[in-house]
Image (cartoon, rainbow, N blue to C red):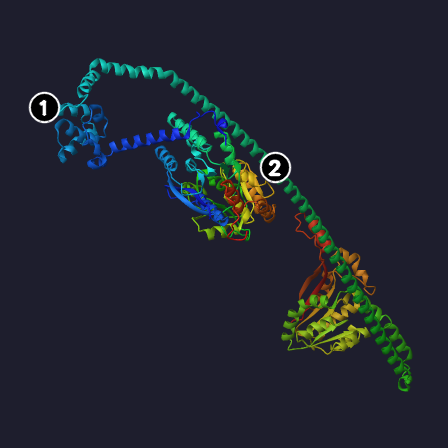
Amino acid sequence: MKPRVGILACRSASGEQGGAERFFVGLRDALLDAGAAAEIVEIDSNESDFGQIRQSYLRFYDLNLDEFDGVISAKAPSYVVRHRNHVCYLMHTMRVFYDMFESTFPKPTTEVIGQRRLIHALDTAALQRPQQVFAIGKEVVERLHRFNGLDATVMRHPTSLRGLHEGSFRYLFLPGRLHRWKRTDLAIKAMRFVTAPVELVIAGTGEDEEQFRRLAAEDSRIRFTGRVSDEALVELYANALAVIFTPQNEDLGLVALEAFQSGKPVVTCTDSGEPARIVEDRRSGFVCRPDPAHIGACIEQLAYGSADVAEMGRTGRAAIASISWDNVATVLSGALGFQSQERRHAP
Amino acid sequence: MDRTDTASANSPKLDLDEMMERIRAEVAERKRQAGEASPTNGLDVSNTVPDVMARVLTARELLALPVAEFVRASYIALLGREPQPDEFTILRDRLLVGHVGRMRVLREFRTSREGRARGLHVEGLTREFVWDRICWSPPAKFGRLAGRVAKDFWRLPRNIRQFIARVEALERRAAEAGLAIKAIHSNRAADRQTAAAHTSQVQSELGQLRGRTDAINRTLSDRARAIEGSAARTKADINAQIAEIHTSLIDHWRNIVDYKLRAEALLVSASPESATAASGPATARTEKAHLLDPLYLSFEDRYRGTRADIKQRQSIFVPLVETCVRATGEAPVVDLGCGRGEWLEVLAESGIAAQGYDMNRIAVEECRKRGLDARLGEAIEALAALPDNSCSVVTGFHIIEHLPFEVLVALIDHALRVLRPGGAVVLETPNPANVIVAAERFYFDPTHRNPLPSELTAYLLKSRGFGGIEVLPLHPVEWESRQDYVDPMLAYLQDKLFGPQDYGVVGRKGA
């Protein structure tokens, strides 16, 4: 009899599809491979205002998942769920009330400060209940410790994007949501310090797309592809010279992992969070100051061949070799008290 | 699992369930308020508030109901009936927009005729009416106003504190930004310095490269010049050697001719017929006269100039000769002292019949070898042998300076005699007006006698009967420093030193 495992997913009100959705699919497939009857339980989660946030917390709290033998939560606020066998594999809490609070509310009202206090209290209380708390990266663990005084175990997971491979080395590639937290503008500005005739290909869409397009309008080397299919994304990775990924306090940085899996060096920033921990400066890429001039200088080294891009990509690939869905599924099954001996496929 | 003690200090230790229940209450309250604010919610009366009908409510309960329920419940409680649909809508909307208050609605219902007639009791309603009156009495109004002012007054220090704190925060941020800007500037400066260092290094390397390139170019051009120079020298050497060989060949040839002629002369004198004429001594004298013939020709070869030069110089007389030939009915030209036959050749090339005379046997042989009509003979004897009026032109290039004066005069006389009317005599000789010629060059030829000034020659021709006398200064020195001097002395000296080295005299025989 296979244990039934429910993976709690948050269905975003805006219908935005991103890395999180891929994560749930990847986790389910890995658990299925590990011999569990895993399924994704999608519940609406709306963060558009605080009233909605309160309701979202309540919705997960009131959820009855007794039919499942085990439950895995990941995103805020799904971890408030009440279940006898609950493990949290934490992606992130609501970051506007944590590390992004100051930048989101430069002049916080007493009301918002009260809201933050409530969210911190809720999360702190809720995250003490699961059997065990894992986190997708060191960044998340450190934040949890700093704000909530809680400990968690780091367990990175790989991308669920399939077919990543190494092709030629042609252009700089920047995939992902076009949002100010991803700091796409930093890469665009860095191109002003790049003399090499190298193209910067930006894939994806997002709320700040217009602004980024305006910023890049003067540079004919910068190209926006808009939303691309998974197959096209894999090809874009395959033929990149290097991947530019300069977000602010990124939790996991799947982009860096995907780049390494495609054998590409990664240019990231010291304050980019997890990518800055994954990338080894000057060995598997560059970890720059968040300064367009410095990033531009690193790009020059890559473009003019004074840095061996292929060798850097190989170093990166070797560094992430141990990160696998297999490992994630085994650890989570173990934490839920299931043995993962039934394998559908050979590893 | 005991992590409670590590929980964050800034959040109160609260139980999750307790917090969630509080949130549940808040959410419910929000929903209730939202329902009150939304007119559409009020229409479906029977579904939302079923218990309005179930029992009679107290005044307090009545006032706490959502607006739609309040309207219905009020009708039921005070008038004992459901509201008509339009009554319901009008009253609900008036309440929603705030035209009337709930207390006023209840008071109107109670005091209305219908209400008084029904006389229904609502628990606590009278107490609510009394309390409402007290609340809206002037002292109560004042009290509320005073209360608000006092509240704001007590808040004042906190507001000031908050304001100061914000200003301080802003100042801190400004200072941080200043530091960041400074850091950026210093980074920029460092980058610029590095760039400048790189640039100057590249420039100096470029300079070195340019220097090296220049050196290589110099070496290459030096070598090219050296090769060109040595090639030119080699060519000049070869040319000189060829000229030398050519000269010696000609000399050998002339010696051979000389020996041949002498051998023939000796054979003739040794023959029995000539032996009787006792011509032995005469032959010997003649042979002695020709002893220096090869030497003289070699001398001429070396100093007179090349054959092409001489032909080019003499060709200026061709138009004059052509005129005379036509004027004399195609009579031949006679050239005295024809030498190597340059002039005869010029005339032949111009299609003019001519015969030359020279006393040098070898020269005559050379002319004949070129197919020219040259004859052995002294100028004066040859001329004397010609019949009267038989020639168009008599020419003598560089012969008169070799002749004794009386022979010269005789030559002029014979020339006049043999020429047809319209014919002319042309004589060319070194020009002693050029002091270099007069003092030095004239004596290069050991057989020259006296320099003849052009005035003298012209005078001789005129005095012996020629007319139309013309003196032509010829062959000025090719001197590259020649200038048009304004100073008369310099101009005179330049002419005396570098002026014409020869002159020609033309004398015409009148009709």
In front of the other: A156 or B339: A156
Residue designated by label 2 = B194
Q: Does residue A222 appear in this view?
A: no
Specify the subunit that label 1 lies on: B
Q: State the residue lying farthest toward the bottom.
A: B272
What is the C-alpha distance between the residues marked 2 and 1?
99 Å
Query: How many residues crowd around disc 1 within 10 Å: few (fewer than 14), some, or many (20 or more)?
Result: few
Badge 2 element: helix
Q: Quadrant of residue B163?
A: top left
- In this picture, residue A56 sits left or right of residue B470: left
What type is the residue that disc 1 sits on? Arg
> Is there a contact, CB below 8 Å, between mark 2 and mark 1?
no
Judge whether B448 appears above or below A120 on screen.
below
In front of the other: A281 or A261: A261
Specify the subunit that label 2 lies on: B
Q: Does residue B294 appear in this view?
A: yes
Q: State the residue lying farthest toward the top.
A: B139
Residue designated by label 1 = B116
| Residue depicted at x 29% and y 15% | B147
Q: Nearer the viewer, mark 2 or mark 1?
A: 1
Residue B291: horizontal and vertical position, in percent? 87, 72
In front of the other: B480 or A39: A39
Badge 1 element: helix
Residue B55: horizontal and vertical position, in percent? 19, 29
Residue B281: horizontal and vertical position, in percent? 91, 77
Q: Quadrant of residue B245?
A: bottom right
Image quadrant where one finds the C terminus of chain B: bottom right
What type is the residue that disc 2 sits on? Thr
Query: How many residues crowd around disc 2 within 10 Å: few (fewer than 14), some, or many (20 or more)?
Result: few
Query: Could you say which disc has been placed on residue A101 in the image?
Result: none
| Residue depicted at x 56% and y 41% | A279
